[in-house]
Image (tube, helix red, strand yellow):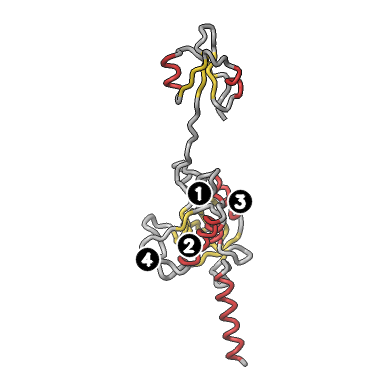
Amino acid sequence: MVKKLFIIALLIVFSVSLFGYDVLAGSKYKVVEVLDGDTIKVKRNSKIKTVRLIGIDAPELKSSECFSKKAYKKTKRRLLGKKIRLRRDKTIDSRDMYGRLLRYVILKNGRNFNRLMLRRGFAYEYTFGKSYVYSLLFKTAQQKAINGKEGLWAKDTCNGKRQKVIKKHIYYVSSYGSAKYYYCDTDSAWKGLSPKYLRQFNSVKELLREFPGRILHEACI
């Protein structure tokens, strides 16, 4: 009977970890600062430490990478001022090359926050050197976000790319002598221009080279 209960307990622990929960966590820390989507500062016993989340790579805030602000806000909203637990992964180094602690962040409800960021599309899975314990689980979480086109994987956000694709606009102008403005393709006023004098350009620079002094009628959206 005791052996049977022990096996059941092991299965529960395995199942909980498999679905992103972690019942085996360390001491509690308070999150005192969020640096970006994957890096935080925590405090315990008056000591402050910088923590880099294992297995994820959130878009760089300093480089203004696509979705970086949303990833930062997500981490800040969920962690700042909260009590969390940190868990080390003994299959990899305790610290990275910058001296930051490498840890899993475990939320109050037992959820693995690192995995949550991947599942919701706020970060990319990141394996540095050898695999970590949850590498397969994390890669599966990322694939689910890709399949569901969530977060940075959505076509109308980043489509999985680091740099957001900047939409190229078409600009219109009337070649009529007294015309003052030029128009962006998102400004429906260009449709009122006479087809007889209508000219089209792929850039403002190109347009102004031929029609200097023209003023943009309305900002591009």
**Vertical relation: 200 (above or below) 111:** above
Secondary structure at badge 2 equals helix
Read off the residue under disc 4: 130
| Residue at image point 54% right, 24% down | 184
Q: Residue furthest front?
A: 196
Say which label, 1 or 4, has the lower sequence index.
1
Q: Position of residue 61 (x, y in %)?
A: 48, 44
Label 4: how many Cα within 10 Å (few below 14, some 14–19, many 20+) = few
Quarter-of-image position of residue 81:
bottom right
The three-letter code of the residue at mark 4 reads: Lys
Task: Point out the image quarter for the N terminus.
Answer: bottom right
Quarter-of-image position of residue 93:
bottom left
Say which label, 4 or 3, has the lower sequence index.
3
**Vertical relation: 74 (above or below) 179:** below
The three-letter code of the residue at mark 2 reads: Lys
| Residue at image point 53% right, 18% down | 182
Read off the residue under disc 2: 139
The three-letter code of the residue at mark 1 reads: Asp
| Residue at image point 54% right, 59% down | 144
Horizontal side of 12 relative to 211 (left or right) equals right
| Residue at image point 47% right, 43% down | 65
The label on residue 77 is 3
